[in-house]
Image (cartoon, rainbow, N blue to C red):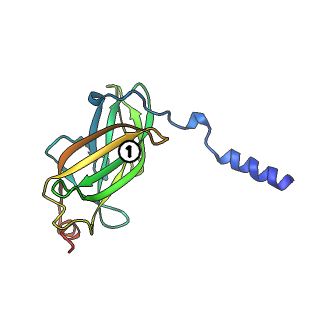
Amino acid sequence: MLLKRLVLLVCLAGCPSDDELLPECTALETDSVMLVCSTLDNQMSDITDGSNVPLLAAPQGGHILFVGARVRAARDCQLTAKAALRDPSTQRVLGLEERPLLLDRKSDGWAVPRDGLDSMPNVAVCPSSAANTAVYDRPLELEITLSTLAGTPIITRTAQITPTCDDDWCRTDCAAHL
């Protein structure tokens, strides 16, 4: 019995308190959400229709889109972000990822994703058995849904983007694999 209590105490000591968890972002309006992409060295840029978005070499292999959103927020907060890359001609999903979106509020009122690969979706795109043509240098549809931590969707934003490669490995990895 004493051992069970000790195990419970150790488990509780290792769990984060409510003060250590970021609160959820709330009351998001369409004009208060901007899609963003990042490079592996945390250089972030906004995504709009027609944006070029770099395909990045993933640490585990393949190529990813490192995408998320920034939101107008009163404080540091978090959401769940689900990102999908689709071929607009077939509606086939070429990549899908969901993870917590950890946001830090800046002085301009926008909360932006934290630095690091764990702060926003890493959409594994290449190689893709779902692609019947090359994934790079052609328009595709990026869709990001922001949800509460419990999974209730709040807002969905889409943009027509063009994934880009900057080396031969990327172009080989992201070519059509028939």
Which residue is depicted at the point 73% across and 50% down? 10
Q: Quadrant of residue 69?
A: top left
CA neighbours of label 1 inside 10 A, class few (<14), some (14 to 19), many (20+): many
Query: Residue furthest toward the front?
Result: 90
Query: Residue furthest toward the bottom?
Result: 178
- Say which amino acid is labelled 1: Ala
Which residue is depicted at the point 16% across and 42% down? 49
Which residue is depicted at the point 24% across and 48% down? 142
Q: Position of residue 139 (x, y in %)?
A: 14, 53
Residue that badge 1 annotates: 81
Q: Position of residue 101 (x, y in %)?
A: 41, 43
Q: Position of residue 27 (x, y in %)?
A: 39, 27
On-image quarter of the C terminus: bottom left
Query: Residue furthest toward the right?
Result: 1
Does residue 137 show up? Answer: yes
On-image quarter of the N terminus: bottom right
**Image check: 116 left or right of 172?**
right
Asked which secondary structure carries label 1, the reply is: strand
Q: Is residue 55 above or below residue 78?
A: below
Nearer to the camera, 48 or 131 = 131
Q: Is residue 121 above or below residue 128?
A: above
Does residue 43 show up? Answer: no
Q: Is residue 112 above or below residue 59?
A: above
Q: How many marks?
A: 1
Q: Quadrant of residue 33?
A: top left
